[in-house]
Structure formats: structure tokens, C-alpha cells
Amino acid sequence: MKKILIIQNKRIGDVLISSVIANNFKAKYPESEVHFLAYDFTHGVIINNPNIDKIISINDKELKKLPVLLKLIRQIRKEKYDVIFDPYSKTQSRLICKFSGAKQTIGHKSRKKFGNWGYYTHPVEISKEKTKICGKAIEDRIHLLSQAGNFEPIDYEPKIFLSEAEKKEDWLGKYANKKVIVLGVLGSTPQKSMPYEYVAEMCDFIAEHYDVNLLFNYAPHQKEEAMKIYQMCQKKENIILDIYAPSIRDFIKLMSQCNALVSNEGGTVHIAKALNKPTFTIFSPYVNKDHWASFEDGKFHHSVHLLEMKPNLFDSFTFEERKKIEANPDELYKQLTPELILPELDKFLKNNL
């Protein structure tokens, strides 16, 4: 029986995407034991996944402390894993792999000239561009998986598994009389967030043209900023503020009962897609769309990116250039105006409502 570990010490979307390794590994080796190491705040997207036998919880800040990292490495060594997959390839996860004692460790080569110090038995080059509709982030993970054998046919779609009890919970109550669009009003970071006045204009457009309820979604610490956007809206009567999902798992249950997601790019988009809900994604100018735009067909899953609408604003989109844009995204984000977004959003809503 094979025993494997997937390390994904990153955000919610990354964890959900990396679960495709578990899903495909279990499909080929049903008797295998699959463990998944992830930050405590991301577990909601992999709870109840029948392809993951054990979730190992780590804390982001704690893992940066050397004694905590050393203790975790000892714990990993005791497990005697056959294979470890390390999709994000951070310093901590590389050290875990190097000293894990696993027969096979698989991760991405460092971009730095002298960065590959024997962390992995199977170091893998990161592909330069996507070749499939699933997007480069998923392709990269499947490429790692392929180092451990032939897993064809591959299932590229991340999945979220709700229990029967979770499916029966009533989240929408009195608002179920209309279709509900979840509106991700803020990105996970300021760099991923649209200008507030643009979000408010988008809300007003939907309220004016469609008979739906709009449910504001944001992280708990973003409430004050979300309320600033609410105050800018002219048409507040159909905006839902008294339903809020306090945890990732609660958001999953809530999203499963809504009709579509319109959002800044981030983990919620990957969750909605895994629940088979239509998504309209607004990409920050600094995010490389080819990496994160998954399963987009222009209808059920659609997105906008300034690079496609005003390509002359981008001299190039190399890793270095992306970092420059990331440092000061506001100037470019202001160029992605509602006049550019709303016609695309209108097409999306007509297709899916």
C-alpha cells in the first residue's frame, strides 16, 4: 500500500486546486493512504473529501519558527511516506521534503540559478504557459503527479464534497424567493481588489437590469471596507447584508445554494467552480490570467482582464514585470473601467440567469 503526502502551505484556492493530486492518486490506488498538509484556515475546502485520509494542520506564523519546523519534520519522518508532492515549493516545504526520508519527493525547481539543493528526488521545471482549459495552476500540479506514474485518464476538476446534513441546511431563508448572486466585493489582498466606486457601479447595474438579490461576500476583517462599498451603492434594496458565512466551510454551504458568483479573482472563484456554479471573475492587472483562469468557456465561466482589453498597457508579462505591476497595481486597475466590464458582465448574466 502506498502512503503519500501533499504539502500545500498557501491560500484556499491553492489548496483546493492541489486536491486534484489526491483525487487522481486515489482513483488509481484506492487502497493508498493520502495525507494533506495545509494551513489551518484552508481546511474547509478539503474536509469530507473521500480521497484524503488525514489532514495535517499547520499554522502560517508558527511554521516560520525553526523549532516548530523541526518538530514537524520529525513528525513527517515518522510517517514513512513513499511519495511527497510539494506544489508550491516554499523554503519550509522544501526542507520538509529534503529531510523527510520519503522514497520519492516531487516539487518544482527553483527559478534562482543556485536554488536546487537536492530538495527533491524528482525536481520538475515549471511550464511556461498553459496548454489546457483547466489553466496552468492545475496543469502544473498534474505534471508533478505524472512523475509518480501514469494516472490517465486525468480528472482535472477540483471537487468539494458536502455531507447530506450540510446540503439540508437553509442559508437563504426569506431571500430564496429570488435568484441570488454572490458578489465578492473585495479581493483577498488590496492588490486584487477593484476600485470601490467601480464595484458599486457594478452592483447598481445588476440591480437595475436583473430581478435578483445580491449577497455581499468578504473576509471577516474586511467588513469595514465592504460597508464603504455598500454606502456608495445607489440601489441598496436588493443587497443582502444579514447573511454572512463566518468560515470557509460555511461559505461553501452558502454558495451551494446560490445561483452565480461575480467576484474579484481569488479562492471563492475556485470554490464556486468546484460546486459547478457559474462564475464571472475580475482579474487584477498583476495576476497572470493563464495561471488561474480555469475551465473558462466565455459563457458558464467568464472573466475580464485588462491585458486582453488594452494589451498596449503591458510591455511584457514576465515574472519580473508582474512583480513591478504588483507593487503599484492601482494605476492599471483604474484603467479596467465599468465601461469595459459591464458589457461582458451583462452577457454572462443573460447566459446564466
Image: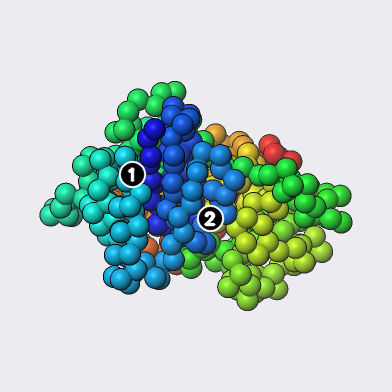
Say which residue appears at 43% left-offset and 29% top-offset.
29
**Which residue is most to the left?**
114
**Residue 102 against residue 31 in the figure, above or below:** below
Q: Quadrant of residue 303?
A: top right
Asked if one can make out residue 315 in the rendered structure from this viewpoint, the answer is no
> Depth check: 271 or 74 in front?
74
- Report the amino acid beneath label 1: Tyr
> Depth check: 119 or 347 in front?
119
- Report the amino acid beneath label 2: His
Residue, disc 2: 43
Report the side of 36 relative to 253 (left or right).
Answer: left
Report the side of 84 relative to 162 (left or right).
Answer: left
Say which residue appears at 77% left-offset and 51% top-offset.
169
* Cα–Cα gap, marks 1 and 2: 21 Å
Residue, disc 1: 81
Q: How far across and how far down the image is residue 158, in percent?
A: 52, 40
Residue 64 tag number: none
Asked if one can make out residue 104 in the rendered structure from this viewpoint, the answer is yes
Say which residue appears at 73% left-offset and 57% top-offset.
214
Task: Name the element at disc 2.
Answer: helix
> Depth check: 298 or 219 in front?
219
Placement of the C terminus among the 4 image quadrants = top right
Say which residue appears at 62% left-offset and 42% top-offset.
161
**Which residue is most to the top?**
153
